[in-house]
Amino acid sequence: MYDVIVVGGGHAGIEASLVSARMGKKTLLITMLVEQIGAASCNPAIGGLAKGHLVRELDALGGEMGLCTDATGIQFRILNASKGAAVQGSRAQIDMDKYRQYMQNICLNTPNLEVYQDEVSSLVCENNEVSGVVTKLGEVFASKKVILTTGTFMRGLIHIGENQYSAGRAWELPSTTLSLQLKELGLDVGRLKTGTPARLDRNSINFSVMEAHGGDEIPAPFSFRTNKNTFNPEQLPCYITYTNVGTHHTIRSNFDRAPLFTGQIEGTGPRYCPSIEDKVNRFSERDRHQLFLEPQTSDAREYYINGLSSSLPIDVQKSMIHSIIGLENAKIVRYGYAIEYDYVNPLELHHTLETKKVKNLYLAGQINATTGYEEAASQGLIAGINASLSCDNKEPFILRRDESYIGVLIDDLVTKGTNEPYRMFTSRAEYRLLLREESADLRLMEYGYNLGLISDATYNNMLHKKNTIQEAIEFMKNEWFTPKKENLEILESIEEDKIGDRTLLVDIVGRSTMTNSKFDVLVPSLSYLNDYLKEQILTEAKYFRYVEKQQKQIEKMKKMLDLKIPDDFIYDKLPGLSTEIIQKLSISKPKTLFNASQISGITPSAIDILHLNINARKK
């Protein structure tokens, strides 16, 4: 008898099982192959724009992905470094082998967590309530909660040209019966597609004709728990090359053999990570596309061709690759392929990631129609936390959109749904000025600490950072800087524009031209702080006015959502509401506008209409 069973050892399954065990729950992780726990099925990288935010938030809550990336990373970069902090994103190349080994060791050595190799063939379910699983070998495991993190394994089907074979990942057995049972239980099961490019032998690549792309000179770690002062990983370069007119001609000439266009593939693919044949077809006016060659391990034996995902036949893949500058003599170690798999419509889920129709069953990762390691891991963590809390009949853990990208991710999935693989972008977060990467610990670490997932030492470090920044901002927003002679001379000495009227110090420090050394001159009482804290103070000052405005909007929204809906309120014929929305509200009878906003399909504009009409009725 277990408290929680996690099915699948990918990025979602790892975080779900670790957090469940760390919260004191007897946990069982069942996976197809123990040696593939933590496998990076596609690109050898963690993070990126918006995805880096997810990893930082995971880390602040006590997740493992950031720590593992810091321990196994072979290149670290801040993307969009020249832009504002709100849209910057950390990205790391990882040693795929070491990443996998790290995660295996963590799972095999975490108290309360057992690992078992087998395929889960069905759920033990009675009266739409799950109470365990049955494996292919006939084992029956009882549990209070089950979390499915099946990735691309449910009825996985791989396509390479006209060739097809059943697999959850290249040459790994698929799960053949589980999704059929989910459908029988009444869940809306659909079909999606994703893909991966070929991998090349390093010794056959001519790097001399490509553009090298190195890591940051001073690399920043992902985890708030990694010591920044001693973090100095050995970094390897990536390389940039491009497709060309000849490449595109080869691809176009073989559209009739492309599974994507012949009807062989039924599932919908990711809009923001299309295959090369899809790009050539959709963007026919372009005569080249950028390719990014990434080392897969620290010894760089194989390179991943980011941007060349394909399911074309192997002879076409050969010709296509050999037409690219620097790859004329490239030897292909593994061919690219597309994979179709079953997923569950995320509208079937509560914000806790428990299914609405089947009690005690949670879903996380690609099974919820997302794409990406980071999106999967974030869902795994939330599912694991909520399954554990539910075991003790405690209140669920739900992150809001205004406090985390994880909150945006899950809210988007369970209220809006998706008919294609969902990927996180900074543009999806309406409060992104509040949700900067480096503020993830300030926003979320208290939650992780209260859940028992963050140590006292780590929590105290966060409190020191938080208090230091708050005290500095509080001082500067109450300190006037007047245009008297000595002050103007100070501004001139640090090459800052002079002021014509008295100005709050926070607005001067918040200028885009401000640096740590200039800050020392303007605020000498805080010059003793380390560079990292000064940088965080400068960022807070830069966004101070914008954040003030957003926080007022959030408070207004919270107040609005707290508004009670009268028990006898009639939704019929309210102008501006669709028939579908009226039906959902009439059936659900939500108590507050917040409850109404949690119903799938209820739009922000519908909430505004309700708000206006309830207030009008009161008057």
Image (cartoon, rainbow, N blue to C red):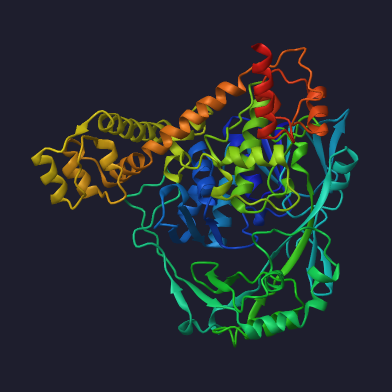
The percent position of residue 261, horizontal first and vertical second, equals 81, 70
The percent position of residue 409, horizontal first and vertical second, equals 62, 42
Q: Is residue 386 visible?
A: yes
- Residue beneath the point at 62% across and 33% down: 385
- Residue beneath the point at 51% across and 41% down: 57
> Foreground: 315 or 487?
487
Does residue 184 appear to the left or right of 356 in the view shown? right
Q: Quadrant of the N terminus?
A: top right
> Foreground: 609 or 543?
609
Most extreme residue toward the left, as rendered? 486
The percent position of residue 357, horizontal first and vertical second, equals 82, 32
> Exactly how many numbered labels are in the figure?
0
> Foreground: 391 or 101?
391
Most extreme residue toward the right, as rendered? 184
Quadrant of residue 500 within the rendered picture: top left
Q: Quadrant of the C terminus?
A: top right
Does residue 176 appear to the left or right of 444 in the view shown? right
- Residue beneath the point at 31% across and 40% down: 537
Does residue 597 appear to the left or right of 86 in the view shown? right
Does residue 70 appear to the left or right of 529 in the view shown? right
Q: Is residue 452 visible?
A: no
The percent position of residue 437, horizontal first and vertical second, equals 45, 45
Most extreme residue toward the bottom, as rendered? 329
